[in-house]
Amino acid sequence: MIAHGIKNREIFSNLEKHFATREQFVTLNTQHVADGITEPMAKITFRSALIYEKALRSFSKSRPPLIASSAFTRILQSDHSDLPPAQFTPMRDGQDLGFRHYAANSEKALVLLHGSACFGDHFHPLAKELSHAHIAQVYTLNLRGHGFTPGERGHSVQHPGQIIEDVEDFLRYLKRQNPRVEITLGGHSAGGGVVLAIARTLARTLTRSPAENLVAKYIFIAPFLGMGSSTVRPYFGGWITKLHALKIRSLVALNLLGLTRWNHSTVIEFGIEACAPDPRYIGSWSLNTALAFGPGPWVMNQILLAKPTLLIAGDADEVFFSHLYKEAFTQIASNVDQPNLGPIGHFDVLVDSAAINAIANWMR
């Protein structure tokens, strides 16, 4: 590989010394435009590269064992015999996005984004409950390269801003179907990171952009808050089994030079052995996919979200340090509800009755 011999730590160290203040850095990953959520291409900047490098050292400092198969026991036992039919709608590049629609007699809609290496059907128990009670229509998305959405599994993202673009396209699709619909955007794990990226960008646009009115509320379910956040366990608690750190550093260095052609390379491998025999889980991610599934690196002093926000997390989360969410969300939103759910795991939270009831009550 071209940059294999580059001493990346020295590069990042020299950059950090050269750029002495925050103001001298280029603006961070995701940027907004007047009438949309993202620019066509979200780029790695010197500033974000430095934050990623520090976070990567912390993330990989200790390697836990493979996440226990017991973390998936309850979700693998979920009954999926009554799933609604798969549907598709095209994104701006012509790629179809797969989703399921849980109908309800309601003007409210909940759009749900799955986590890393996962798929939209994880939300079936929650979606079915909200739909049957006519609390909200629910749309469970299979993000690019996941679930039954077409494309190379884990490697279909063409640039780091593409997942956000896809979600924006889907939200606009719903608004075209019913301009009066009140949309709540929710996400689990890395999907929660995508929700945070979108929410922060919409908060920056304020009323200058029609996109600001796309979403009325936010739900974060055991969310990924960005590399460098104190809430992130090393290797996601063993969900990640192999992190190609040298390749990541090399690719980031190349991205800083404007070279992105190798961003499809595998940089993360997941411990899907723990959730066997379900073939819907994804074994690996490219750099583009890894960058697209999240809010960018953790940065303090961002604009606080003013819209109603719900945080759902159990005390027994295997992937994140859930006891640190409360402090972290003081940097995220000004109006957060966080019910106490007790000792529920990272994946159990998607099927646990206490978590589902908390979301249903908040959505009413």
Image (tube, rainbow, N blue to C red):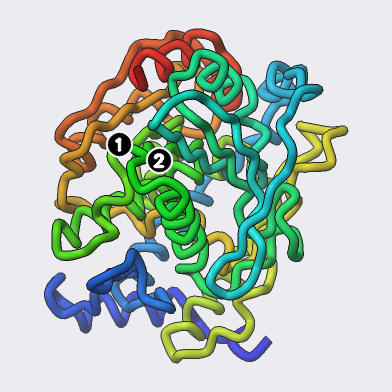
Tell me, for residue 185, which label it has, or none.
2
Please give left or right for residue 67 compared with residue 356 in the image: right
The amino acid type, in three-letter code, at marker 2 is: Leu
Q: Is residue 167 visible?
A: yes
The spot of residue 245 in percent (x, y) is 58, 64
Q: Earlier in the sequence, mark 2 or mark 1?
A: 2
Which label is found at residue 92?
none
Q: As rendered, which of 331 and 140 lies closer to the eye?
A: 140
**Among all residues in the image, which is located at the extreme right?**
277
Whether label 2 touches label 1, CB < 8 Å: yes
Residue name at image x 53 percent, y 51 percent: 60
What's the residue at 32%, 78% (across, down)?
A: 46
Residue that badge 1 annotates: 217
Q: Is residue 30 left or right of residue 356?
A: left
Q: Looking at the figure, which quarter contains the N terminus?
A: bottom right
Q: Nearer the viewer, residue 357 or 90?
A: 90
Q: Give the residue drawn at x 64%, y 26%.
A: 124
